[in-house]
Image (spheres, helix red, strand yellow):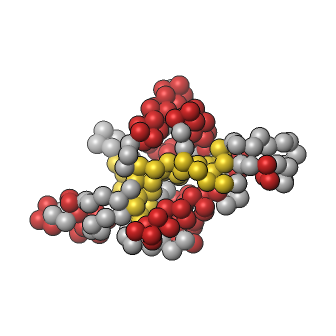
């Protein structure tokens, strides 16, 4: 397996990985509760979102790709080389002024946004058939190494599914973050 930057030609594969592999993520389930009723709309939304991220100069989309060495290791069927199995979207460093305006922010927001610059992991997804093979760890380490190279922190706002991975790589839990839509009674804590 190897890492490289994603291209727009791979939007279909990236969207497919997203909608099929996040189905067991509680945050995705909460935010996309109608995806079963409108699967085409959900897929289209993710293609558009991923396309906008690929064209955004402030974001870097890294993919984990299979190579010839991965063929037949522990699977009965052949694996096609150059198949994307995982990706991560990292937001590059930028100054977050709203975290510094203390008169307008509460203590929780100052904790969450108090760093002047940081790399932020927007999204990381691994195809369900290729989990627990090190792809997500490598993608996470890529962002950590970029942040270390620039001597700035990096941050994730992860779902419960990734908590153990993030902790194993040295991330600290700064506290719960509640997602709640105004029109709904339910909420989810990440």
Q: Quadrant of the C terminus?
A: bottom left
Q: Residue furthest left?
A: 103
Q: Quadrant of the N terminus?
A: bottom right
Residue at figure coordinates x 66%, y 48% from the top left: 65
57 sits to left or right of 130: left
Measured from the top left, where is residue 28 in percent x and y?
50, 45
Residue at figure coordinates x 56%, y 33% from the top left: 9
63 sits to left or right of 28: right
Measured from the top left, where is residue 91 in percent x and y?
40, 53
Answer yes or no: is residue 5 visible: yes
Q: Nearer the viewer, residue 38 or 156?
A: 156
Answer yes or no: is residue 15 visible: no
Q: Looking at the rendering, which quadrant does residue 119 occupy?
A: bottom left
Residue at figure coordinates x 52%, y 35% from the top left: 8
Q: Nearer the viewer, residue 72 or 57?
A: 57
Q: Looking at the rendering, which quadrant does residue 23 occupy?
A: top right
In the depicted structure, whether residue 138 falls above or below residue 173: above
Q: Looking at the rendering, which quadrant does residue 113 occupy?
A: bottom left
Residue at figure coordinates x 53%, y 25% from the top left: 40
21 sits to left or right of 55: right
Q: Residue furthest right?
A: 76
Q: Nearer the viewer, residue 77 or 182?
A: 77
Measured from the top left, where is residue 90 in percent x and y?
45, 54
Measured from the top left, where is residue 167 in percent x and y?
53, 71
Number of numbered discs? 0
């Amino acid at each position: 397996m190897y890492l490289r930057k994603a291209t727009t030609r791979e939007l279909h594969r990236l969207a497919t990985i997203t909608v099929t592999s996040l189905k067991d993520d509680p945050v995705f389930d909460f935010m996309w509760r109608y995806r079963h009723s409108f699967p085409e709309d959900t897929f289209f939304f993710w293609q558009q979102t991923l396309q906008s991220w690929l064209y955004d100069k402030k974001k870097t989309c890294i993919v984990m790709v299979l190579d010839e060495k991965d063929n037949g290791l522990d699977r009965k069927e052949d694996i096609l080389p150059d198949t994307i199995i995982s990706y991560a979207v990292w937001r590059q460093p930028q100054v977050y002024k709203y975290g510094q305006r203390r008169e307008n922010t509460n203590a929780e927001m100052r904790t969450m946004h108090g760093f002047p610059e940081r790399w932020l992991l927007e999204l990381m997804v691994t195809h369900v058939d290729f989990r627990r093979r090190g792809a997500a760890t490598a993608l996470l380490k890529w962002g950590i190494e970029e942040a270390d190279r620039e001597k700035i922190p990096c941050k994730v706002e992860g779902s419960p599914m990734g908590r153990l991975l993030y902790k194993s790589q040295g991330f600290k839990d700064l506290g719960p973050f509640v997602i709640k839509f105004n029109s709904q009674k339910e909420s989810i804590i990440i």
